[in-house]
Image (cartoon, grey):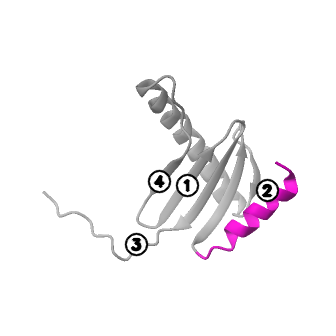
Amino acid sequence: MAQADVDEIIKRMQKQKSVVGIIVVNDEGIPVKTTLDNATTVQYCTLIQHLVVRARSVVRDLDPTNDLTFLRVRSMKHEIMIAPENDHLLIVVQENQDNDTFEAPPNL
């Protein structure tokens, strides 16, 4: 995919009002494109890289012929969507749309 195409896709995703930031990370864990500040980008890259390695390992342990294609992590504040490709990770952070309706389960 050409760099201009990647830039256009990122611009379109960034226009979504719930999107907080977008990061493209190479296979060495280095951010090659980001819409977030440097400190936040480094934090996400480091933690997400480890999470993807672990998630991919779980998927392959369950079925050696399978591979991780998408990972979605949802918290009370944000939703992080991760699309691992051959030599890059696409990380999209967006506001959790349902954070007003979330209720913690009662203590047991």
Work out whether mark 2 precedes mark 3 in sequence or the reverse, and give the earlier one.
2
Q: Residues within 10 Å of mark 2 (few under 14, many from 20)?
A: few
Q: Secondary structure at mark 2?
A: helix
Q: Mark 2 or mark 3: which is in front?
A: 2
Quickly name the residue at label 3. 99
Work out whether mark 1 precedes mark 3 in sequence or the reverse, and give the earlier one.
1
Q: Main secondary structure of the magenta part?
A: helix
Work out whether mark 4 precedes mark 1 in sequence or the reverse, and give the earlier one.
4
Q: Residue at x 61, y 58 (%)?
A: 92
When asked about the image quadrant of residue 50, the answer is top right
Q: Residue at x 54, y 32 (%)?
A: 67
Query: Is residue 83 depicted above or below 92 in this figure?
Result: above
Q: In 3D space, how far apart are the residues under numbered discs 4 and 2 (Cα atoms)?
A: 23 Å
Along the line of sight, the residue nearer the viewer: 60 or 43: 60
Q: Residue at x 48, y 27 (%)?
A: 60
Q: Mark 1 or mark 3: which is in front?
A: 1
CB under 8 Å between callouts 1 and 3? no
What residue type is disc 2 on?
A: Val
Q: Residues within 10 Å of mark 3 (few under 14, many from 20)?
A: few
Residue 43 makes an appearance in the image: no
What residue type is disc 3 on?
A: Asn
Q: In 3D space, how far apart are the residues under numbered discs 2 and 3 (Cα atoms)?
A: 30 Å
Work out whether mark 2 precedes mark 1 in sequence or the reverse, and give the earlier one.
2
Quickly name the residue at label 2. 6
Q: In 3D space, how far apart are the residues under numbered discs 4 and 1 (Cα atoms)?
A: 6 Å
